[in-house]
Structures are given as structure tokens and as C-alpha cells.
Amino acid sequence: MVPVVAAGGVVWATRTVGTPEEAADSYLTAWSARNYAAMRALVADPPADFEARHKRFYADLKVTEAAFHRHVPNGVFAATAEDRGGVVSFQARLSGPRLTWDYGGELRFVERDGTWKVAWTPAAMHPLLKAGRSLRVVTRKGDPLRVLAADGTPVNTPDAPGSVQQLVEGIRQTHPDRFKSPDRYRIDLYEGDRVVETVVDGGGYEPIKTTIELKIHRAGAEALEGVRKPASLVALRASTGEILAVVNKPGGFNRALLGKYPPGSTFKVVTASALVAGGAEPDEQVTCPAEKNIGGFPFHNAGFKDYGTLSFQEAFAHSCNTTFGEMSVASLNGGRLAEVARSFGFGIPIEPGVPAVRAEFPDPKDDTDLASASIGQGRVLASPLNMASVAAAVASGAWLPPRLIKGAGDDRPRPLEPAVAAALRELMPAVVTDGTAQAVRFPPGTAGKTGTAEYGSGKEPPAHSWFIGYKGDLAFAVIVEGGGAGSAVAAPIAARFLDAVT
């Protein structure tokens, strides 16, 4: 006690022990531990049903864990509780099976018997509460998950293009838990049995956002109209690896992502990269005989054409099998071609957000196997998605794992050697202007590579028709199963596609 001098003499006044902040810390600690006896001891006039009210508060909100702590304002000159009329602010976090809720509240303190006590009302639990009011969690079935195109258009709908619906099924297969319809929750403020307001709306599922651009997808579908054999077209944004279009005709099997085909001469993009990295120059003189025996097996050019002596760039443009087979055996033994193939994604698992196969480049067993691999035959296999990513690597200067859903899989770029990328940007345009695809009218600035990938047996075995390429930041691949020459079938499809999007 401390003496106070008054007119009639000395009056003894009692000093209040501690501070409201200290009392608040004790109260909030007890509340976090659900120690209702300790809480009651810190309340000025606790109601008879003090403990029951707190238990009902938890039950209505389906709380399994709770934490309360005093709010400490920023700033050196923050007012004390006594300055604020005995009010102490606190922060609460309530957690339950469907709920994690943070909110702020206040405790009001009064002096009682030399100590600070909570002047308790229902508002001490939450500022919106008063006599007759309660807060309750309300649950209902969640809305169906939405899958969106890049522009926000829902694509898991009956009117979405068939190939896009096929992608949605692939997403469902890869992310089945995302398609389950969980309960949604909200927290409502009730007065008796009447809802006063919704305090927290838990919202629904976050939609799955794909990278598909419907305009580009439609252009791909239109480019395949009239094609009578199974065909696919894949388009990517070269700088990011985002999949912009995946078209399969007919539907049923997603050959664009799951089909494994010999890539034929489109693989010469990879082989040329390895040769350039080893010192080959675009203007270097090479020979291109009609036929060449390599490792005891006769390799020949399409139509047995003999181009004689020409530049390496011209050999690439004319897709000289004999040139590439001979040069590869001479300088790409010892696993060098396999190493470069890996830099273009061969042998690397890809996880775009839907099932997709990896490109395969088995180690060549002998010179014949290496020569076959160098022209995309033998045991080399790839999907249209794989080969579109090869074209994208040339356009951007780095191989990027393709992806359909943002955040899916590994998105780390694997840069090409700058000199290699620069050389390929000379070689691939020459295919369109002076080489195997020169008869096709492509938009200016197109670079590409034809492919005629033989399969089966016989003197004139059937062949898949390929064309891969890029224009600006748009990379693509086209395949027509059993279509024959890439220059005659796949290249015109690619040109129609580019005309529609540029």
C-alpha cells in the first residue's frame, strides 16, 4: 500500500498488482490450454455456464486446436491497455478438419480487489457475439472442379473440343484427388436459429489452369481436317515449354503424348547439333551419294537421289541419309550422340501434368545401329510432344520440359551451346526455303525439318509422315501415321496451321 495525503490526514490506497497485459497473457495461455478453471479465476464476474459456453463455442465451430496470444502493436509509442481504457487486443487461430480461421478480438479489463480481471461478455470470445448469438460452421457439397484453358474458359464440359476433353481425362488420371468433391465450409453468425451474416466463406475448389490456348488448338484441328489417316499436332510456346495445343484425329488414343514412333529425319536436328558441337560448319563441304554401305548395311537417300558434293547445310536441307550416317559413324561414336540426345530430352521422364511418354535413344550397339539412330530410325522412338520440344529447344536456345499445368514437373531449362543453336537456326530455315519442304508455301520466318520414318519391312516399307518446326516463339510437330513422305503430307498440314495462327 502507498500513503496518500488528504485534507483530513493520511489515507492508505491499494496499488493494483501487475498490468492488464500481464493478466491478458495469463488468460490467453489458459484459454489455449482449455484450462477453464484458470480462466474463470481471471474473470471479474464469470457466468455460471462460463465453461459450457466455451465448449459450445468450440463445438459449433468444430474446433480441434486453438491458439490465442496477445496482439503486440508495431511502434515504440503503442498505447498501453490502461491508456485504451483497459482493453487488450488478441489474435486467435482456430483449426478443425475443414477450417483454419484467424481472427482478432479484445479483452476488456477492470480493477477488482487489487488485481486486473477480465470484464467478460460473449464478445470476449469473438467481437460479433452477444447474448443469443452463436458462430457455427456450415458444410455443404463442394462445386465440381473446373479445368480451365489459358484464357479461363472451362474445358471439362461436353462442348469442349474432343482432344481437349481427352487431356482433361489425362489430368484426372494424374491428379485423381483434385477431382473428388469435398465439402465446402463457411462460418455463419446466428441469432437463435436465424442467420445474421456469413462471416467466413471458405470458397470452392481452386480450378486447374492449363496452358491450352483454344485459338491455337482450333487452328491445329482445322489443319488436320480432311486427313484420312491417324494424325496428331502438338504446339508449344518455345520460351516456356507450355503446351498450347494437342490435337488427335481420330480420338480414342492420345498419340500426341503417348504414341511412340521412329522420328525419322526430324531427328537430324539432334544429330546436326552433335555434329556442329563437334566442329562441323554449315558451309563445310560434304558428300551425299545415293547409297552408302555403313557397317555392312546399305543406307540410301529418299528416292535414291545423288546430291554429289554439297554444303553441310544443303545436306541437312535435302535430308541426306548417307551424309548423316557416314558423318555420325566418323565422329559421334563413344556415346556422344546419346549424350546430345539427352540434352534434347531423350531418356528424360516428362511430367506435363498428364500421362506422357519419354523419348527413347538406346545406346547404339554398332556402326549400323549408330547410323540408323542418326537418321531417326532403328530403335529411336519419340512422341509428337517429344519432337515439338526438340524444335522448341532450337527456337529458344534451351530444352524445356513441356508442361500443360503450371507448376507441374521439372521446369529447369537445359541450355544448348550458343554456337549449336545459332547453326541450327541457319539449317532449319533452309529446309523450308531450299530443301525438302520448299514446294510448300510456309509463312515467312518458318524453320523446320521434314521426316519420313520407315517402319515394317519390305523393299518399300510404309512410313510415317513428320514435320517439326517453329516460327517465332511457336514450336510444333505434326505426324500422320503411314502418311508417307513428310514433305508431301505433314509439311502442308503444318503450313495450314501456321497460316491460321499468324
Image: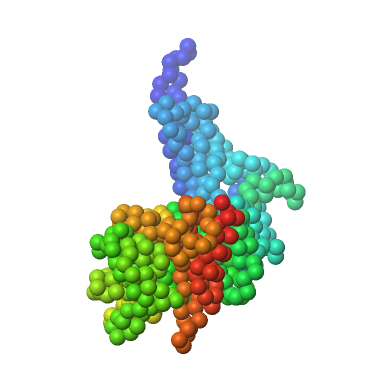
Image spot of residue 480 (x, y percent): 55, 72
In the image, residue 71 sits, relative to residue 157, either above or below, namely: above
Left or right: residue 151 compared with residue 352: right
Picture residue at 50% right of the left edge, 81% below the top: 462
Q: Measuring 48% from the left and 63% from the top, which residue is drawn there?
A: 437
Left or right of 432? Residue 327 is: left
Residue at x 45%, y 34% (from the top left corner): 73
Residue 212, percent from left and from top: 56, 58
State left or right for residue 293 relative to residue 39. Answer: left
Q: Residue at x 47, y 39 (%)?
A: 71
Indicate the position of residue 198 as horizontal and vertical percent values. 67, 47
Toward the viewer: 73 or 112? Answer: 73
Answer above or below: position of 303 versus 204: below
Q: Position of residue 283 (x, y in %)?
A: 30, 58
Along the viewing direction, whichever of 502 and 257 lies nearer the viewer: 502
Q: Residue furthest right?
A: 194
* In front of the other: 202 or 477: 477
